[in-house]
Image (spheres, rainbow, N blue to C red):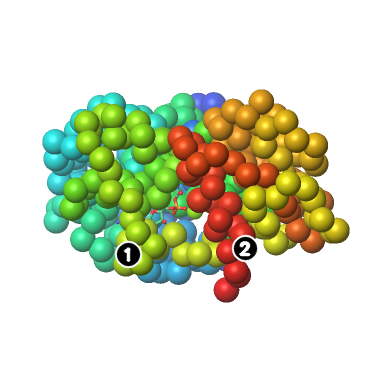
Amino acid sequence: MPQNTRHLSANSQGYAEAAQILREGGLVAFPTETVYGLGGDARNDMAVAGIFEAKGRPRFNPLIVHVDSIETAQRYVDWSDAANRLARAFWPGPLTLVLPLRADAGLSPLVTAELPTLAIRVPAHPVAQDLLGTFAGPVAAPSANPSGRISPTTAAHVTAGLEGRIAAVLDGGACEVGVESTILGLTDGPVLLRPGGLPVEAIEAALGGPVARRGASAPLSAPGQLASHYAPGAYVRLQAHKAQEGEVLLGFGAVECDLNLSASGDLREAAANLFHHLHALDALGAKGIAVSPIPDHGLGAAINDRLRRAAAPRE
Ligand code: TXA
Ligand code: MG
């Protein structure tokens, strides 16, 4: 349904208006420390259906629920020792835990795409925390981009993709981490379902043991892992040392390029710049985006994961 998307400021009036929209079953995009989320009341079927509709997202792809604290999370999932250890170490922050959904959770079945598990996290961004505190309920929120496109790290990215399809965007500036949360399955031993803003090495250190990596042939347990995801309009070519005819070069480290993820080779800075630079290069209308090699450790694993998906053949 076309509507005017309102631009709300991150102040008490903005939070009150955003919370009111959520209570009425409307959709509000809001900043988290990773990327902007497209929020709706996770208990309201119409709101959750609206999220899928606004994004053009396949219904079999479940959503992450955002809550304000560990105590609130325990109302929705079966808690465990490993969950407790990780939540105490890394929440609020860029870690999503997949745990058994409680039978009395009271969430819309659309949120989990009827899976017996729920993906849940406590975001660290102060604007997300204020919104969750004012609304005082669980907020289902995928990244606030049309399905299959690059995730938004500014309010302007959100409106570029979803203007007219959502009630409001709460503007909290640019996201600090810049790639989505790390998703960890805890239903059957710790399994990395999606590398993200929290390096898996940090999770292994906190657990004092290894985290399994989901092999390429494993069943689709995080359906957002579909190959052609995060696609800009331009094609993407990896491990490039220079741009070819019709390409722009997205660099890393000391290279001559059109835009640099981090001239000093800092992976944290590169993650924060990744989607921003892809949006910016895409807007130049280049035929292709060539990308410098990026180390695969720490946040580099999440960066390379997103780049491989951006470079994958399109459906
Ligand atoms: O940083 C983030 O995680 C952002 C911010 C807004 O919180 N959200 C985000 O949501 O990236 P989304 O919908 O773009 O990605 C969520 C991923 C999808 O790949 C989905 O398949 C997976 O989480 N997921 C959700 N529920 C799941 C479950 N029960 N089991 C396994 N994977 C699940
Ligand atoms: Mg997404």
Q: Residues within 10 Å of mark 2 (few under 14, many from 20)?
A: few
Ligand 2 has an atom within 8 Å of the beta carbon of the residue at disc 2: no
For label 1, the residue is 218
- Residue 68 vs residue 156: left or right? left
Residue at 19% of width from left, 42% of height from top? 75
Residue 97 in sight from this viewpoint: yes
Residue at 73% of width from left, 53% of height from top? 289
Q: Which mark is residue 253?
A: none
Q: Is 255 located above or below residue 115 in the figure?
A: above
Q: Earlier in the sequence, mark 1 or mark 2?
A: 2
Q: CA distance from mark 1 to mark 2?
A: 39 Å
Residue 306 image offset from top left, x and y in percent:
54, 51
For label 2, the residue is 2
Q: In front: 301, or 254?
A: 254
Residue 290 image offset from top left, x and y in percent:
72, 52
Q: In front: 218, or 275?
A: 218
Residue at 37% of width from left, 38% of height from top? 200
Q: Is 96 located above or below residue 284 in the figure?
A: above
Q: In front: 45, or 195?
A: 195
Q: Which amino acid is tagged 2?
A: Pro
Residue 65 image offset from top left, x and y in percent:
34, 47
